[in-house]
Image (spheres, grey):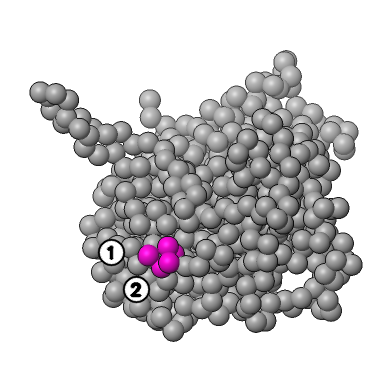
Amino acid sequence: MSRGLPHSQDAQPSWDPRTEACQPVLTRPGPGRPAEGGDPTVRPAEVRRVGLTELLRSADEFTALVSSTPGEEVAVLEYLMAIMYAAKCVPPTPTDWHHWVDTAHSLEKAADWLGDEPADHWDLFHPQRPLGQNALLAPFMAANGVGPAQLVIERTGDYNQFFDKVHLHDPEPLPSDAAFRAMLTQHAYGLGGRAMAKADWLGPQLTYQAVGRLGARIRVLARGRTLGDTLRLNIMPCKPADIGTFNYSWTDGRTGRRTFHGRKVSRLPDGPADLHSFLGRSILLRPVLVDGEVMVDRVLRAAGEILDPLAPVHLQDAVLAPRRKDGEPEPLRPSEDRALWRESHAVYAATHRADPNLAKGTDLYDRLAGLHDRRVDLTAVGLISRQATATAWVSDTFPYVPGREEQLSWAADEGSKICEYAAKALYAAATVARDEAYPNPKPADKTSLFKRFHAEPDLWAGAADHFSYLIAEVSAGTDAGDGPLAEFGREIHALTRQVLRARLTSLPPGGRGMNARAKAEQKVKRMLAGPSCPPYLKEPPRD
């Protein structure tokens, strides 16, 4: 690829995501043209790239967005919903919401509104009001701009080196569509910590980045059969007077935008349009022309706006879990130690426990429960980070069928208890194996010896598929107690013994090792037959 030069003010480029192919999508398969003299063919699904206007106008022709990460997909869906709110293409009441979902209400109104918007509102490289950005950073770009990899959450390391060895100042440009989607992801999921900005630019608070509004919790989306279905399922009923203000850019004339002098100032959103387009970062992109294509070769990134604690109406998807210290509920957080499927019992519990702080029908799960004769997948997404560095995106999907809430919640809860107890038994067995095989270890070796015999990680890895099958069976209509839970218990019983045996093969040979193996296996056997063992786990493994 040949290198280009940054555009001057006299030749300022423009790039409009409404019409530019900014998002890959998967089309729906459908009937194709019949072969000559033959039967009609089936048109396979394919990946296309479209702009925001077509995304909305043809939303029911697309199965889903095609995104590089789960977080990017969430960020784009959030932005599309912000546009729907701004266009007043939203059901005003829960009753209207059900009608919209049942009749696949057209999103044409949002597409028309977007297409009629002034062009300078949607220009990614507008000199005074760049879309989604803070033009006040422009004076500092030439001397301080860094490589565009700094814009991509999962590529940012310690500000000097990236995970994929791309240096901070590497000039490899980023396509405008990828930069646009990465910018939306930063606004939603940006990590906390110091920014590569200087206090004398716009004020000392510019360097302190807050965690993005979705960066510290699990976001749950109801996924439908098409992109349009997904958007309708997740849009919150809202009266036109309450939609709030759409955020075009930092310098779009909105009053009350924070400054970076003095104390840190946060605010509440004035409605869902404001919330879903919230500018969680100050970002600026520098365009460059490469082989006739407008790309991004330098970026600046710093602190953005900060949200006050949100009211329940703005956290309808949040799955609440008790805090470890005081037991008060808080939104479920992603964890590198627990796969998301292990939290499915909390997700399913939310589906049949309406939020008492919200009116009937204004809670997401309450609305979903009112749907008839259909399945909805609940997709949970989170970002795991460590010391302001992204570690991994986590995502999982849980089938949900209205009317099956109690059965699904029971199956998930019992399945979780079965696995947790089996893990507890393996912990005890590993302790026995270590203490019998190495009765007098060095203190520094005790932890490593324990990990050598501890089969819990192998249990969780092996249990995931069994758990998915359990939930699939129950969602398909089988009562959890009529067979699925008993079968799951037998599988986990067998898996527990299997992973323990595999770990114990590393015991030293001879009598001490044989004695350690026998006592560890006996420990598990006793625990799996004891009074505290979940009933379904007590079933012996199938021959």
Nearer to the camera, 135 or 412: 135
Judged left or right of residue 279, residue 508 is right
Q: Residue at x 69, y 45 (%)?
A: 288
Q: Residue at x 68, y 66 (%)?
A: 128
Q: Position of residue 114 (x, y in %)?
A: 44, 64
Task: Determine which of the numbered discs, if any, sits on residue 91 in the image.
Answer: 2
Q: Position of residue 18 (x, y in %)?
A: 48, 56
SS at circle 1: loop
Instruction: Determine the main secondary structure of the stretch shown in magenta.
Output: helix
Q: Which residue is mark 1?
A: 105
Q: Quadrant of the N terminus?
A: top right
Magenta highlight on residue 172: no
- From this viewpoint, which residue is outermost toward the bottom? 241
Mark 2 is surrounded, within 10 Å at the Cα level, by few (under 14), some (14 to 19) or many (20 or more) other residues, namely many
Mark 1 is surrounded, within 10 Å at the Cα level, by few (under 14), some (14 to 19) or many (20 or more) other residues, namely some
Q: Position of residue 466 (x, y in %)?
A: 43, 38
* Mark 2 and mark 1: Cα distance apart in space: 10 Å
**Which segment is the magenta one?**
112-116
